[in-house]
Amino acid sequence: MQTVVIGGGLGGIAAALRARAKGHHVTLIEKNQQLGGRAQVFERDGFRFDAGPTVITAPFLFDELFELFGKKRQDYVEFVPLNPWYQFYFSDDHSRFNYGGSVEDTLQEIAKIEPKDQANYLRLVEHSKKIYKIGFEQLADQPFHKLSTMLKQIPHLGRLRADRTVWNMVSRYLTHDKLRQAFSIQPLLVGGNPFDTTSIYGLIHYLEREYGIHFAMGGTGAIIDALHKLMLEQGITVRTNCCVTDFESTATHVSSAVINHHERVSADYFIFNGDPLYLYKHLLPESYRNLQLRWKVEHSKRSMGLYVLFFGTTKQYPEVEHHTIWLGKRYRQLLAEIFAEKSLPDDFSLYLHRPTATDPSFAPSGCDSFYVLAPVPNLRADIDWQVEEPKLRRRILDALADTLLPGLHDCITAEFAMTPEQFKSDYLSVDGAGFSIAPKFTQSAWFRFHNLSEQYDNLLLTGAGTHPGAGMPGVLCSAKVIEKLLPMATVDQP
C-alpha cells in the first residue's frame, strides 16, 4: 500500500512513521531544502538558531515514535529538563516571576506577588487536570470527522465549561492581574488569543505540571535530524526541494500529486501536512462544492502572525533564563489590536529564547544566541513590512537593551528577521498566519478542518490547522489520529 506524505514538518514526519509502522510504503515530500517545517535551523557567523518551536512539553510523544520500531529516543537525541520553565518579566515595574520546577517552587514564587493565590493556584491545577483527562488523554488522538463524535462529547465539554475562555478560566481562580497574565499566555503559544480561546487549552497547565518543560540538546533541529535518521532506517523515502503544485482527483478521490508542475506521484493514500486553507484554496479548489469546506475556508479566523528576530551577542547574559516571557505594559488591549487584523501596535510583548543557557554549542565561546518572537497581526492587516520591520526591530532591541540585555547595541551581531511575509512564502501559510486557524471553540474538534478530508476519501490531514491543534503536542497527536484512520497493510519493514 503506497502512502505519500506532503510536508515534512513534525506532523508529517510523525504521520510518515506511523504509516510505516502499519506496513505502508511511504514517501515524504518536502518543498524546502530542510525537513522540519517551521522547525528550521539557521546558521549565521558561527551562531545557530532554531527558527520555530523550542518548548517540549510532552516528551513521551517523541518517545512513542521511536518505540514503534523498538528503538529508544535517548539513543538518537537527548532531552534535558529545564528549571525554571519560564521566567516572566513585567516591564511596567521590572519584576520577575519564575514558573516551573516543583509545586512548592511555584507556590513560593506566587507568594511574592499574592500569597492568597497560592491556594487558588492549586485549585487551578486541579481544574486543569480534569480538562487534561478528557481533552488530552481521551480526545486529542481521536478522529472528529463525524458529527456524532462531537455530539457525544457535549456533556463532558459542558461540565468542563469549554465555552469559557482561557482568561475566564484563569480569572475564576487567580486574583492578581500579573498572575492571571502569566497563567493565561499558553494560547499564544498555539496561535490563540487568551480572551477568546476555548478553556480546553487550559489543559496545558497540567501537561506542564505532569511532564515539565524539556529542551533537546542541539535544539529542535536535533529532533528533526533524529527523526529523519529513523525514517531512513525504516525505509521511508524522503524527497526535499519538491513542491506539490496540484492534485489530480475525481469528486471524492485523489489519484496523484503533481510535483513542481510536471511530475505525477500516485498513491493509495495522501497525507497533507500543511495549512488546510492553502490546500483547499490553491491545490484542490474543486473542493468548494463541499459546503462545509467552503464555510471553513472562507470564514475561518486565522491565528495571529509572528515576527521573529534572530541575533547573537559577543558577550553572555547569564542572568537571562532559557525561556523568558517579556510582558508589555498592556495585555488585553494589545492582544485585541493584534487579533483585530488592522494595524501594527506600537508596543509589544515578547518571547525571548536563549538556548545557550542550556546548550553552549549554539554560539561561539563567550557568546550567546537569541531569538525574540513578537505576536503581530497577520497579513490581513494593512502593514507594509518593508517599511515597518526596521522600525519594529529597533523598538524591540531598544526595549531589550533597556531591560534584560544591557549593552546590547554594543555587542549584537548576526541579526536577521522573519515577518508574516516569510511565513506565507516559506511555509505556504495563508495570510502569513503563524499557526493556521485560531483555536477558538467554534474552530475546535469537529468544527476544525478534519483529519479525514471533508471531501476526499483517501486524503488525510495532519498539522496545526487540523484536530487537535497547533504546538508540538498538538501536531504529534494529529499524527496519532492519522494512524487510527489508515488501514493496516502487509507488514514489510526492513
Image (cartoon, rainbow, N blue to C red):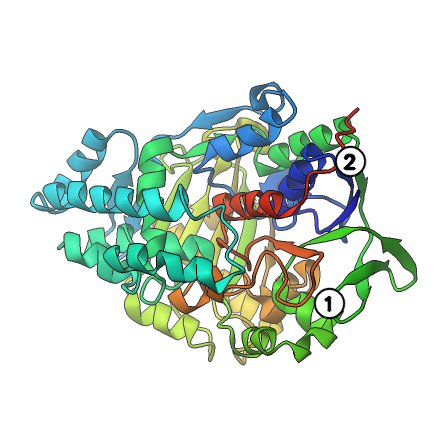
Rendered position, 367 above or below 241? above
Regarding residue 335, the answer to whether it shows in the image is yes
For the point 43% across and 48% down, the residue is 139
Residue 405 appears in the figure: no
On the rendered image, what quadrant is the C terminus found in? top right
Q: Secondary structure at mark 1?
A: loop
> Along the polypeptide, which appears first: circle 2 or circle 1?
2
User: Disc 1 marks which residue?
Assistant: 252
Q: Residue at x 40, y 44 (%)?
A: 138
Occupied quadrant, residue 92: bottom left
Q: CA distance from mark 2 to mark 1?
A: 27 Å
Observer-nearest residue: 345 or 208?
Answer: 208
Most foreground residue, 341 or 166: 166
- Left or right, 289 with respect to 373, comes to right
Q: Nearer the viewer, mark 2 or mark 1?
A: 1
Pick the residue in front: 410 or 466.
466
Residue 308 sits above or below residue 410 on the image? below
Residue 125 drawn at (x, y percent): 23, 42
Q: Tell me where residue 122 appears, x and y as whole percent.
A: 17, 40
Residue that mark 2 sits on: 236
Taking 88 as reference, is 355 above or below it? above
